Image (cartoon, rainbow, N blue to C red):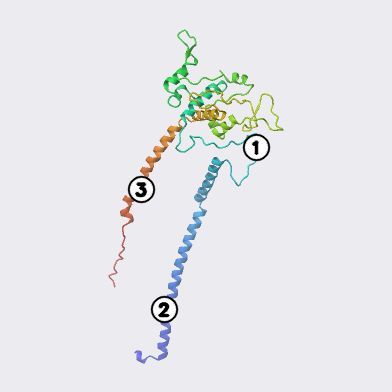
Amino acid sequence: MLSRLPLAALKSSGALGASRSTLSNVGTRSASQVRFASSSSASSSAFQSLFTSRASLVSVTLFSAGSIAWYTHLYGSLPFIGEVHANSLADDGLHPGVYPWPHKGLFDTFDHASIRRGFQVYREVCAACHSLDRIAWRNLVGVSHTADEARALAEDVEYTDGPDDAGEMFQRPGKLSDYLPPPYPNEEAARAGNGGALPPDLSLIIKARHGGADYVFSLLTGYVDPPAGVEIREGMNYNPYFPGGAISMARLLFDGLVEYEDGTPATTSQMAKDVVTFLNWAAEPELDERKRLGLKAVILFSALFAVSIQVKRFKWTAIKNRKIIYKPPVDKAH
């Protein structure tokens, strides 16, 4: 049969076969291109949906707001946004310097000898006007004094107690459970004794003032004569670290004002440093214990984290390292 076909028919059949193969190749390429296009379009749509979803926008907004809030908490203001104040810098007071306190480090604790000296400065100087309502005599035990020393200090103070069997109030020596006595019986008496100004309680003064210990130290050692053009009314004193510059409290710390028991020279800066350390302890008496427990917790949880990583690797090794082989079914029709 093939020998009888003309040559033109053979040529036409060959051209038809070539055209069919070409069409099949084009169809295969177009199908592969369609598959690639569909996969790329699907990935791009998923990428766009990720960035346009409401959850993503909320997450990015919360992260940005949290970052800004944390930065302003640490440094006070953003570097690229100016601050607008209704008052001048003099109204806010001179910014205190940063001092290397011995308890400032991550693993550092209070200088307990300085706390003892600071309590002496408070008792002999500051206690005449300022109260310390949140500190009891028992809080000094094991920190700056022994139990016998703290009990002897408490017994030197007379406390009003009662009523007795006759219904009368009476005076008794202090006990370790008593709180440090206030200098004035009430707020009105405190104002009357200080020209209308109310001396603040010093229990939380380090926490209550911006700058903390640095501010209180700078305030105690920052008394100077007012500069030219600055007028301070009678009864006030000039201190650039106090907001407004005019403060009712006069300078109280002078060299040699107290005599330390351990022989430390009682300079103005030394007394200020000791009393600020004592007030810092009064505001945060649990600092030493908190750092001690924190260090133990870091060591414990680090060890548990390492153990959990090892257990996770042991449990998942068999799953991650297994080999999956797919054997397609055999078509028995062919």
Residue 132 appears in the rendering: no
Closest to the camera, between mark 2 and mark 1, is 1
In the rendered structure, the answer to whether residue 79 lies left or right of residue 302 reads right
The secondary element bearing badge 2 is classed as helix
Looking at the image, residue 67 lies above or below residue 277: below
Query: Which callout, 2 or 1, points at the residue further toward the start of the chain?
Result: 2
Looking at the image, residue 284 lies above or below residue 328: above
Closest to the camera, between mark 3 and mark 1, is 1
Query: Crowdedness of circle 2 by 10 Å Cα count: few (<14), some, many (20+)?
Result: few
Q: Nearer the viewer, residue 101 or 304?
A: 101
Q: Nearer the viewer, residue 228 or 85?
A: 228
Q: Residue at x 32, y 53 (%)?
A: 317
Q: Which residue carries the number 1 mark?
A: 89
Q: Residue at x 44, y 80 (%)?
A: 19
Query: Which callout, 2 or 3, points at the residue further toward the start of the chain?
Result: 2
Q: Which residue carries the number 3 mark?
A: 309
Closest to the camera, between mark 2 and mark 3, is 3
Q: Residue at x 49, y 60 (%)?
A: 44
Residue 23: mark: none
